[in-house]
Amino acid sequence: MGGKTDVWQGTLALMVLKTLETMGPLHGYGIARRIEQTSDNSLSLNYGTLYPALLKLEQEGSIVAEWGVSENNRKAKFYKLTRTGRKQISKETQQWEETTALLARFLSPGEEQA
Amino acid sequence: MRTLRVFFARFAGFFSTQKREKGFSEELASHLEMHIADNVRSGMTPEEARRQAILQLGGVEQTQQAYRERGSLPFLESLQQDLRFAVRQFVKNPGFALTAILVLSLGIGACAAIFAFVDAALVKPLPYRDPARLAWVTEKVALIPRANLSYLDYLDWKSRNHVFSSLDVVSSSSLLLASPTGPVSVPIVRASDGIFRTFGVTPILGRDFRPGEDLPAAAPTVILSYSAWQKRFQGRSDVIGQTITASGLVYTIVGVLPKSFQFAPRGNAEFWTTLRPSSGCETRRSCHDLVGFGRLKDGVTMQAALADMATIAAQLETAYPDSNRGQYASVEPIADVIVGDVRPILLLLLSGAALLLLIACVNVSSLLLVRFESRRREIAVRGALGASRRRLLRQFLTEGALLVGLGTVLGLAFAQIAIKILLHLISEDELASMPYLQGLAVNLHVISFSIGVAMLAAALFALVPVLRLAAANELRHDLAEGGRAGTGMLWRKFASNLVVVELAIAVVLLAGAGLLGKSFYRLLHVDVGFAPEHLATVDIAAPHELFPNDEDHVAIQRHILESVSALPGVESAAVTSVSPVTYNGNTTWFRIVGKPYNGEHNEVLEREVSPDFLRTLRARLVKGRHFTEAEDSTKPGVVWINQALARKYFPGEDPLGKKIGDTTLSQKSIAEIIGVVADVREGPLDDEIWPAIYYPFNQNPDTFFTLIVRTSQREETILPALVEAIHKVNPDLGTTNESTMRQHIDSSETAYLHRSSAWLVGGFASLALVLGVVGLYGVIAYSVGQRTKEIGVRMALGAQRSSVYQLVLKEAGWLTVAGVVAGLAGSVAAATLMRKLLFGVRSWDVPTLAGVAVVLASAALLASYIPARRAASVNPVEALRSE
């Protein structure tokens, strides 16, 4: 699987939250697949790391979990965004944008700051 | 905020681990199913599909592990593991665990029990409003630092002072209440009307005394103590307005005091009534029967209050030289007076208990050390398997904390039992004067104290493995050698030091106990000046209200003596105004006719006795003659004096035939000295003999007196017959304190304080001795175990058994000598600190110290003989082969 990027520490939570915002309630496997698809298969996601991250979000109150039935009639645990989670998305999105903008300024060539 | 929320979620998660993990297994299963199904759909074989799914998951076990760590607090998880492991260790080695827990619980229990008393007496504030602003206000004379206040002086002190927002007085008294066996005397307090406002105490029922209710003309009112309300009126709320008839007067109940109220000077007082000064005493400035309580004005210090009262006392001295010469003022914080007596003893006992605890901790520390040594291999294996040093340390800390925790719980149970037993040992009278001890039990204060102590102990135990682990760099070496020979050197040094500390503490406690025991023995064998065996005593009250005339009292006393003397077994009977060995009080001022008098008060004890007083007590009349029954108020006055008075006021003279009188030499006070009495101990056992004058009861009768009977039978058995005979003489007479003279002496406050401290410190010392000797045994036995090979080699090379004995005993001997020497030095220092509690013994009492050294040395010898014997019986061949 050469050429794939590892998931950065701390970005997984935001990806999960954003996925749930777009897709609505989803089970763990679904979230994992969706993240891979969104990244155009350029991310190397170890599915196992997803579950502790989900648990942490649950502990923080950003998501809630409920057992339900999947599209092809299997029992699965579904995760749903809460209001706290939505607030967290906007907060973290803003932070990311600021960080990337900052980094972009460093990385863009030819610009020297006084 | 979010972090906190996560923490609580994980903390809660700790308690639902199983449920969560089961749920996650299902979740994972469904995840894999979906993934495998997808993989199959994309063309893989089922096996390959499964393999890929697990591969992409990163392993089922690993995922579960990561999830588990996230779900709860890893710290709690490993604590739980450590605890489980510790319990398993203890169960595997129950002897060690039980010994350690028991030893610790004894130390903690002793400390907690004594602390409960210290807390109640010295820490908890007295149950008054702002007790630090309350002053104990009395007069002061040369002989008596806290002398009662006279009523007229009180009125002047109250009106002239600038330092108290209120100043009130009380007088201990008693009332006769009807009971099935005749009237009994009930302890009460007479007080000025503002007393409860000064204390800052409000009745829970009814009202306070009203201003003016303490004047002579006021109607008698009474406020009940909470216990009297419960006992005599079953706590009924309709008691307000009811009346009590006592000692011929009718009292209206106006209030009930709160349960928390206590008054140590008269702790068992059932009723509080107002002063209504009418009796002769409160009309005379020279008659002192009150104790004052003042509440300091804001910003006024005790010293300033004392200075102000001293000024007033000086003014009164000038104005009334006859009565007030030499009458000074005393102002002290109320707590100093109430708990002043028991403070040094409680602190002594607390120090004793603390030493015991220290020895217990040291003992358990060395037990832990031994165990640590024997677990070196285990530790090495765990280290080799990847346990970090911190992780190992935590394991030991957990074990130590678990030991201490269990020891504390058990110790608190011991403490509760000990408190109950100690309270039982205190006589009822003593307990009444220490009301702050009522209902004493293990409470929140005691528990927090014990937890504090336990944490210190746990920290101490933690220190041992920390030091040891820091020194144990040679993990691999341990692994290879399995912790056999040669590794114990450092430990042996450390443990030896611990044993020296233990032995030294044991010596200090033993010496303390020895000195206190000797003091107590000396105290009980103080010459009281009479034969206290076979004497029975009863206090009799014939109150003024019922028996107004002096003649009544003389007649009653005569009838009682006659009818009591007729009882079978009675050899002789007498009365006195105050039983011997009670207190140095009830004093009078006298002057000698025909000698120059400078107006100074010659303050001496005054006792009124019947003619057979000395014969009944078997006290000695040094010279002169006894009183006769006929010598009453119609005959010229006569007195005896004791030898102390003769020595002080008639040095080198024959006092017989000399005349004495009151400070003004009034005609009716003049009496001739007709006898000199060999000193009878009227005051406490540890006090000096004061000069005393004995008046014939018939010339100087009193409403309250003590009957003393000498009997040929056992004195306890005659007490009911005495009470019956007294009530036959007159059913209105009150009787209290039926007792034998022995009991009276043994339960006197001085004897009580000495006995309790001697017994308790003795108990601590015995435990300390056992613990110290066991500690020594442990070290020597361990050392012998370590040196088995060396001993084997020595014996193979021809060493005699006797030299092996010598080898071991020498090691023990050095430790013992070091411990004893350090301990003796400590003992002298400790005894110097507590010399005020010693009686008739010096702090460096050589026989006691020598005795302690011998006891400890022989115990130590015995303890080291057993391992020495084992060493000497080593079979050299086996010892060498075993390595």
Image (cartoon, helix red, strand yellow):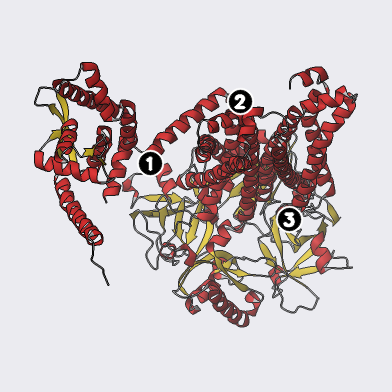
Looking at the image, is A43 positioned above or below residue B798? below
Closer to the chain start, of discs 1 and 2, is 2
Q: Are marks 1 and 3 in contact (CB under 8 Å)?
A: no
Q: Mark 1 points at which residue?
A: B234
Q: Mark 3 points at which residue?
A: B835
Q: Mark 2 points at which residue?
A: B95
Q: In this view, does B417 lie to the left or right of B815?
A: left
Give the percent coordinates (x, y) of residue B511: 75, 45
Q: Which amino acid does label 1 sit on?
A: Gln
Looking at the image, is B730 positioned above or below residue B200? above
Looking at the image, is A95 positioned above or below residue B777? below
Give the percent coordinates (x, y) of residue B475: 61, 35
For disc 3, the neighbor class at 10 Å (few under 14, some 14 to 19, many from 20) is some
Q: Are marks 3 and 2 in contact (CB under 8 Å)?
A: no
Quadrant that contains the C terminus of chain B: top right
Residue occupying image coordinates x 56% and y 39%: B109
Give the percent coordinates (x, y) of residue B775: 70, 35
Residue B859 in which image quadrant: top right
